[in-house]
Amino acid sequence: MKARTLSAIILIAIITPLIYVGGIPFALIIGLIAVIATKEINDLHRYPILIKLLSFLTLISIVYSNFDANTIIFGLNYKYLSILILVLTIPIIFYQVKGKYTIEDAFKLIGFILLIGLGLNYFILVRSFDLNYFLFMILIPIMTDTFAYIAGMMIGKHKVTKLSPKKSWEGYIIGSLMGTFIMTVFYITVINNQTNLLIVIAIIFLLTVIGQIGDLIFSAIKRQYNIKDFANLIPGHGGILDRLDSLIIVAITFVIFLEYL
């Protein structure tokens, strides 16, 4: 527990100034996170070196595909999507016969890169759009997870799924309710107090649920590969993807509703 708390404090101390500054420093740390996340995905497989190199390059290209916050709703450039598909499918003709990289491997890798790349690109875009909106976006799953954890420890009895056996319905419900309440207060205090409150509450509540679903999606990936964590990079927390699971899914969903907030 001490290692988990200490590592969390260190991460917050490093990331917070970069979030505040934004711009190139923030984009660079997101790029570093993308590289580490790609390594964690590659470590699940025994891809040839060329495929691993291409996965790094394609993920970075998606993460940095757009810096223009004015196009945040339609942020992905089709060029990068085309490059991603071509670069990761063409090597099949050289490796599939040898059993080193199959069509199934290719589409799994494309899916991982799109999921992680889009989420991290939206981190950059939302931060470029507005600092307060970025804080709003990332604090929704953080607040939800925090209260879900506390409630689950105190009163959790009914388990949600075997994918994540420590998660309870009590924790999920209280996490979503408290996350919605706190982030609604944040929104009307920091972002906009002249708004349709019912719409804002509905969107926030949906994002709290989506965040918890995101956690289960990544738990399903870990269950598929029979691992507890994606890595041992962060003491007490696991890997980068273990910390970004719900954040990535919330970021992908957040941009859908941004025009209504």
Image (cartoon, rainbow, N blue to C red):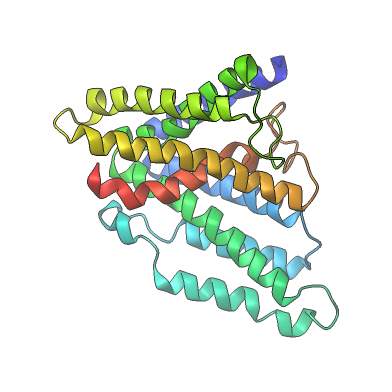
For the view shown, which residue lies furthest in the left direction? Answer: 194
Q: Position of residue 201 (x, y in %)?
A: 30, 33
Q: How many marks?
A: 0
Counting from the top left corner in percent of width and height, residue 109 is at 65, 64
- Relative placement, left or right, of 33 versus 123 is right
Task: Work out whether 175 lies above or below 200.
Answer: above
Q: Residue furthest front?
A: 158
Q: Quadrant of residue 187?
A: top left
Q: Residue furthest right?
A: 98
Q: Position of residue 149 (x, y in %)?
A: 59, 23
Quadrant, the N terminus = top right
Residue at the location (43% across, 22% down)?
178
Can you say whether 42 is above or below 25 in the image? below
Work out whether residue 206 can be spotted. Answer: yes
Q: Is residue 112 found left or right of 227 in the rendered image?
A: left
Residue 154 lies, in percent from the top left, at 62, 14
Residue at 57 percent of width and 65 percent of height: 58
120 to the left or right of 102: left
The residue positioned 75% from the left and 53% from the top of the image is 224
